[in-house]
Amino acid sequence: MELRETILKYALINAIQHDGKANPKAVIGKILGENPELRPKAREIIPLVNEVVQEVNSMSKEEQEMKLREIYPEFFEEHKEKKEEKKGLPPLPKAEKGKVVTRFAPNPDGAFHLGNARAAILSHEYARLYDGKFILRFDDTDPKVKRPEPIFYEWIIEDLKWLGFQIDEIHHASDRLEIYYSYAEKLLEMGKAYVCTCESEYFKKLRDEGKACPHRDLPPEVQLREWKKMLNGEYKEGEAVVRIKTDLNHPNPAVRDWPALRIIDNPNHPRTGNRYRVWPLYNFASAIDDHELGVTHIFRGQEHAENETRQRYIYEYFGWEYPEAVHHGRLSIEGVILSKSKTRKGIEEGKYLGWDDPRLGTIRALRRRGIQPEAIRELILEVGLKKSDTTISWDNLAAINRRIIEPIANRYFFVADPIPMEIKGYDEEFTAEIPLHPDYPERGVRKLKFTPGKPIYVSKDDLELLKDNEYIRLKDLFNVKIVEVSEEKIIAEFDSVEYEKAREHRWRMIHWVPEGKPCEVLVPEGEELIVRTGLLEKNANLKVDDIVQFERFGFVRVDKVEGDKVIAIFAHK
RNA sequence: GCCCCGGUGGUGUAGCCCGGUCAAACAUGCGGGCCUUUCGAGCCCGCGCCCCGGGUUCAAAUCCCGGCCGGGGCACCA
């Protein structure tokens, strides 16, 4: 094809795609993009393109199309095949099938929440993707400031299993103190670590000036002797610490000679009691464990990025290879508190009902609301491993969850804040038969019976639809005309049975209940937990854990059944 | 203050490494329509984004520099 004709082809395509006007820049881009061999000649091509584009733009759309059909009819044929791809995680660097080992290392000092779920789900997902191994390791080495509690060990395992995890190994850092001790000793012997007995303020001052503390360069024999004194109790809490030698001039003072082990006098650790008084800090324990357990890939929050720099010193000293680390941004969900300390405080103050309070973002809270594990997993995978922080919206989670529960959730009428409605002019009994699920008639029907002379109940939420002389359809029953409205009572008059009539007139449709059983729905709204009380259709046979849709109200999960009374938690519209 | 990371529609993500097919995709949201005994689901149409300023280049969301904004670290916490 002649150069000029090639240009003409792209110009015509571009013009046709953009309402008859081609853009010379876009045309050049296309030409050079699809024909790399022309790139060196870019300078010569440009004036020619401008010329051709001008020519094309002066043609009518019909002329353009005709011309393109003449020189390049293929354009009108293809057109369908779109690109599919996406979905699913990107490949992991340095990952080999069957050899990937990942870990999730929480501190069991609080309940597992959506924010933690990012690292956990990514770790697990990649382990499965590469037929590798997923390790759960409890980083419970702080018996003091972030004290682990027995219940959280159980809950974390329970929550992970609920999310569908296959946990291949479980370890507890608190079982491994001897291991940390032995590596600490090795480093001391190697002259790569030292026992520092400086006042912490004094040490910081030296560190910020890039100066060594007096203990740094003492010989290994002295260091080991000091180390024994740490172990046997001659040093008390706060008096001595083991530091890893790094670079005193490291640009980031936070990296300089970081602390690896410290003393806790009366740890009273939930697992080991007072058996140990020297405890590793996070960076030390984590560095040793990741190597010892054969971890190949680490997923963790950005707040740990600097820790990689610190930990690499140990890997270098021992000649180990550092795992591939992926640092993702922080994950939050709009309007929901995830912080463990704030949650704990709220619980202590009695503001929250517990770690599974529906207002919270813990996995247990989400589960109570009827959020499905698969929805959480999908959401996390969609967010992926970006480094930027993400604030996901409830709408997003709700949309995914709705798609999952919509087919399983049977329908019922729940009338919040019921108002009696007297209906005149219909003197027979009328039983409405309503499918449990409109798309699955085979599931059967619910039967709601209207009895003349007895009121039915409608929701105060629908009050604005109920105006004098307006018509309304009681869903699956009949059409009525509103005669009188107050907050206490509504009087209506029977109009007609036919659904078609309501549809023709575009009358609004509301749900109702002839007689009901008590029902409460807990609706979390930000920091508030609103209790909606009302009536649920009498024969609704709901069990705890059922996820149903209260028509025109929203999806809920049944949390409790007390005799006749049903207590549900609102998930989303 | 010092040291790391980030910045694409209202929200989340793809594209950035390796400049052109990006006149920017997908989901959610919002607006409208169709369908439907739900304000639900489904289908269709529409709205809406490359943080700012320079530079390199024929060509920048993409590379470089500067700024602004946001997050994180600077614990004997994890």
Image (cartoon, coloured by chain):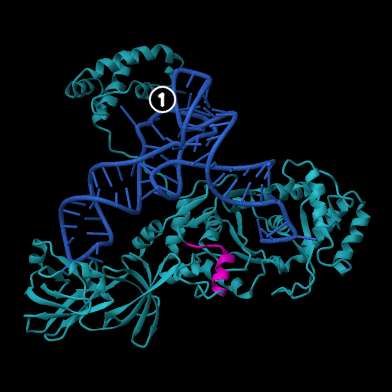
Colour in which the image shows chain A = cyan
Residue A134 picture quarter? bottom right
- What secondary structure characterizes most of the magenta part? helix
Give the amino acid type for the residue marked by disc 1 in the picture: Gly
Chain whose colour in the figure is blue: B
Q: In the rendered view, does A193 fall on the left or right side of A359?
A: right
Q: Which residues are magenta?
A: A336-348
Q: Is residue A99 visible?
A: no
- Residue A409: x and y, percent? 32, 70
Between residue A370 and residue A298, name the one nearer to us.
Answer: A370
Q: Quadrant of the N terminus of chain A?
A: top left
- Residue B17: x and y, percent? 55, 33
Disc 1 marks which residue?
A33
Between residue A78 and residue A420, name the one nearer to us.
Answer: A420
Is A37 situated above or below A214? above
Dot 1: within a 10 Å radius of its alpha carbon, few (fewer than 14), some, or many (20 or more) residues? few
Residue under the point 25% across and 15% down: A55
